[in-house]
Image (cartoon, grey):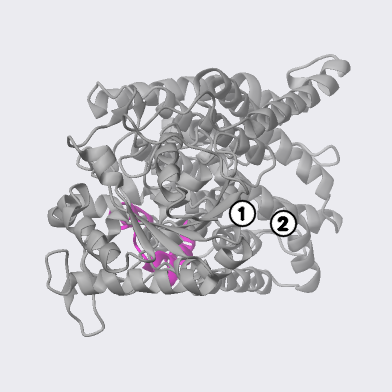
Amino acid sequence: MTFVLPHRHPRSAPPKSLARYAAIDGYRGLFVVLVMLYHFGVTSLVGGWVGINHFFVFSGFLIARMLVKEQSRTGRIDAIWFYVRRARRILPPLLILVAAVVVHTAVVEQPAQRKQFGGDAFATLGFFLNWRLAGRSDAYFDMFGDPSPLRHCWTLAVEEQFYVVAPFLILGICLLTRSRVRRAAVALALAAVSAIWTAHLGYHGIADQARLYYGTDTRAQALLVGLATGLLLGVGRDGREPRELGRTLTHVLAWVGFLVSLAAIFVLTPTSAWVYNQGGMLLFAVAAALMGFAAIDRRDLLLNRLFSWPPLVYLGRISYGLYLFHWPIHLWLPLSALPTVIAGGIQLLLTLAIASLSFRFIELPIMLHGLRGLFRRRFSRRLLPTGLIAALTAGAVVLWSAPAVAGPVPTLVQGQASYAAPSPTRTLVAVGDSVPDFLVQDFAESQFPGTRLVASAYPGCDLVSAPMLNASGESVQRSDQCVQALASVPKKVRTNHARTVLLFGSPSLAAPHRTSAGSRITVSSPGYERLVDKALDTVLAEAIKGGASQVAVVNVPCRDLHHLDLDGEYGQILKQDAGTVSAMEHPMRINQVLAAWVRRHSSHARLIDLHGALCAKGFQPSVHGITLYADGVHFSPQAAPMIWGWILPQVLSPRQGGR
């Protein structure tokens, strides 16, 4: 999410007045405020995430107009100068942010967070954070775990990856096509390809969201729509801009784009599948393009006057800093004891002050004059930026490579068996959803020598093959990644010579499912046990197929979910399905079914009673002062060693064997 300001090219005339772009700045001011308010607690604005799409469109639009004008005037595009301008705009405030995060992480955060946030800092500096977040299935709309203070920098990664090819793409289009309409058609065709690809990947449930939300290939459609609009409205081969449409038609298009965008804020939810599956992102990109089209109209349009309101324009001018700094301020200054309105107001004012100072004293001088705007001496201009980037990269790598845990592992329950390192090394394959997936990620082999863990798990993965019903009663099929994770169990068992499969029961077993006959099955339905037994039978058969001799079933511990304030798919369940929430918080029925299945398969199965260890006296949020759940669902990185220290001695006992 960047703000594009025309810069003086050393071989060009002075830049024109920025007044023509005032309305676009006003739009950016509006959307960045909506994004910040949502993050600060105004959850009714959850659809404001469409504003990110609009920023991509506006950015592609302005970049295309700038580069096509250069190509028309000189016959070429100076890619090096383009990258210099991008670096001047992007890097100064970004380096400030990364420096703050690295220092804060090193001083304040726990070892597990240091490792994760250090990797995020390195990915931010390398502009590939979006793929790192997608790779770990980061839940943007749910505050699962400790969200990264750099999570929002995924937008910069998408833009910079696109800008690597943008000059050459625009140059190629301009050289191959003569008319503005054909140039725009090529870019729109590429946007349509991105939209079709997004629909092909498809949103089938929360597990698919990270890939679709963060992917460069899925987000490219918005940038390409902006590119198409810039090519259509940019100068032609004769150096002239196109004639303007009729005033009334321009007014209508502008208001349509604005009202569609405004409606999205209140209509969209984090689980609106049609945004990905039926071209919704492309639709909202076109709406943003209509707004941009009218924003540069020279005539006195009402909508342009409204969005040229100076305070809104100013917010748009500093929108990059507002966007960068608001998220860590929210995380580091939560003010949870105060009402949301007061806490959000304080965070908003602090963000505004920091972004204003950054823009006035750092960003603007560098945009207009390069490093000369800050440093007079040539030595300083060369050494300080390079040294800062090198220091931040080194600091990020040090944090990233640090061990995730430190110190001895506390016991989970009094009198539990001590961990004894097996010889030779034994490998366990963990199967399930994001709970075992996160536990495996937080496993430290240095604290449990002789044991290796391999995950065959995926976030949101339902053991039951029948479609799950969400809070709205819609069927949600298992994602392809989930199906692949379960299907890979035999291969992972065989490849790693594992004799034991760790099967983690999931709270999702409490969700209603729909059978092939159309029946709705809940935990209290007569067919519930048969449904779960079939799922467990399948896992056992796959484990034995790969060569394992036992399946250790970890049952489901109690949880306290009512205090969570989530806005994604889980948030809808919490707000709309009290029965399912109760069955998740008190999973007695789930655990009865799991225990009965283990008894019937005692020659190949063993029960690991995690519920008994954690919930014998009811829900407990912490043990030995260590918070058990990072988000109400997943175990915290600090608690993970305690969980493994309790599970492993049981699974690896001589009676059960295992390898």
The residue tagged 1 is: 60
Is residue 613 toward the left or the right of residue 502 in the image?
Answer: left
Q: Quadrant of residue 166?
A: bottom right
Q: Amino acid at mark 2?
A: Ala
Magenta residue check for 16: no
Q: Verify CB contact (< 8 Å) between mark 1 and mark 2.
A: yes
- The residue stretch that appears in magenta: 261-288
Give the spatial CA distance, label 1 vs label 2.
9 Å
Tell me which residue sits at (77%, 65%) in the image. Answer: 237
Vertical placement of 232 versus 99: above or below? below
Q: Specify the farthest residue to the bottom.
A: 517
Q: Which mark is residue 113?
A: none
The residue tagged 2 is: 166
Helix, strand, or loop for circle 1? helix
Tell me which residue sits at (79%, 73%) in the image. Answer: 176
Q: Quadrant of residue 179?
A: bottom right
Vertical placement of 584 versus 450: above or below? below
Looking at the image, which is closer to me, 223 or 137? 137
- The percent coordinates of residue 115 (x first, y second) are 58, 33
